[in-house]
Amino acid sequence: MLKPTGTTFEEAAAVPLAALSALQGLRDKGGIKPGQKVLINGASGGVGTFAVQIAKSFGAEVTGVCSTRNLDTARSIGADHVIDYTQEDFTNNGQRYDLILAANGYHPISAYKRALSPKGIYVMVGGSMAQMFQAILLGPGISLTGSKNLGFLSARPNREDLVFMKKLLEAGHVVPVIDRSYPLSEVAEALRYLEEGHARGKVVITV
Ligand SMILES: NC(=O)c1ccc[n+]([C@@H]2O[C@H](COP(=O)([O-])OP(=O)(O)OC[C@H]3O[C@@H](n4cnc5c(N)ncnc54)[C@H](OP(=O)(O)O)[C@@H]3O)[C@@H](O)[C@H]2O)c1
């Protein structure tokens, strides 16, 4: 499809997988609604920076979880509240959320369940392998035993959702956060950086 008007090629390249994962997690799996309390765990990464902005565009009250050095980034993209995971465990602070999207980190699925409001939804998009397996293997069973719903998202690339994102980008509701751009000759270095797990937004290759 056509590149959104007003975005650079680097910004446009950052969108497809990360933004569609965030969109499908929040809207399709999470059923996000205006006014809901939504928490994004891993708010400062590639998926998380899109998730915060998309959740805001749906009218949610958004809490972003990241480390100290990324708190300002989370605020700058619209998070209403920020939690520093090095200082506070959001699954133990007494707050309850209507929707939790896990883009990074690890908490046992029982802790996510505890942090949900009575009909809350937990969507696991990324993070540790243990977090993924718990969501896939235990999520469906736990969801059957009460009013909360816990599960895993497998993002599906499709044109319709790219069109949806194009509109959000052109309206300025979502702005891709680019941490670093690398030339094609430095792909290996770019992947090494990404694999450290602390990118602030997306890492882009320029061709
Ligand atoms: N399910 C799907 O279809 C799908 C699609 C796309 C991606 N994914 C997965 O989604 C995950 C996220 O991808 P991504 O591109 O967003 O990753 P990323 O950009 O590499 O994530 C880096 C970010 O994660 C934060 N982070 C690291 N440890 C954390 C913790 N314990 N708690 C909270 N935040 C933490 C880092 O912040 P600090 O530096 O502040 O720690 C950093 O800003 C990956 O596991 C990826 O494989 C899944």
Image (cartoon, grey):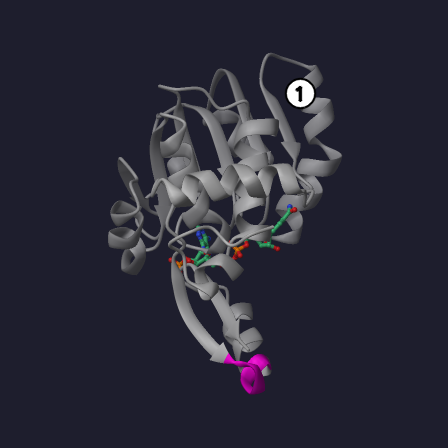
Residue drawn at (57%, 87%) of the image: 185
Q: Is residue 106 above or below residue 37?
A: below
Does residue 35 appear in this view? yes
The image quadrant of residue 28 is top right
Residue marked by disc 1: 143
**Magenta segment, principal secondary structure?**
helix
Between 68 and 153, the one lying in front of the other is 153
Q: Residue furthest bottom?
A: 185
The image quadrant of residue 167 is top left
What is the number of callouts on the image?
1
Between 34 and 5, the one lying in front of the other is 5
Q: Which residues are magenta?
A: 183-187
User: Residue 151's spot in the image, x, y percent?
Assistant: 65, 31
Where is the C terminus found, in terms of image quarters?
Answer: bottom right
Mark 1: secondary structure: helix
Q: Is residue 96 left or right of 70 when viewed as pictured? A: right
User: Residue 23's spot in the image, x, y percent?
Assistant: 53, 37
> Cβ of disc 1 within 8 Å of ligand 1?
no
The verdict on residue 65 being magenta is: no
Residue drawn at (35%, 40%) of the image: 173
Q: Is residue 134 left or right of 9 when viewed as pictured? A: right
The verdict on residue 185 being magenta is: yes
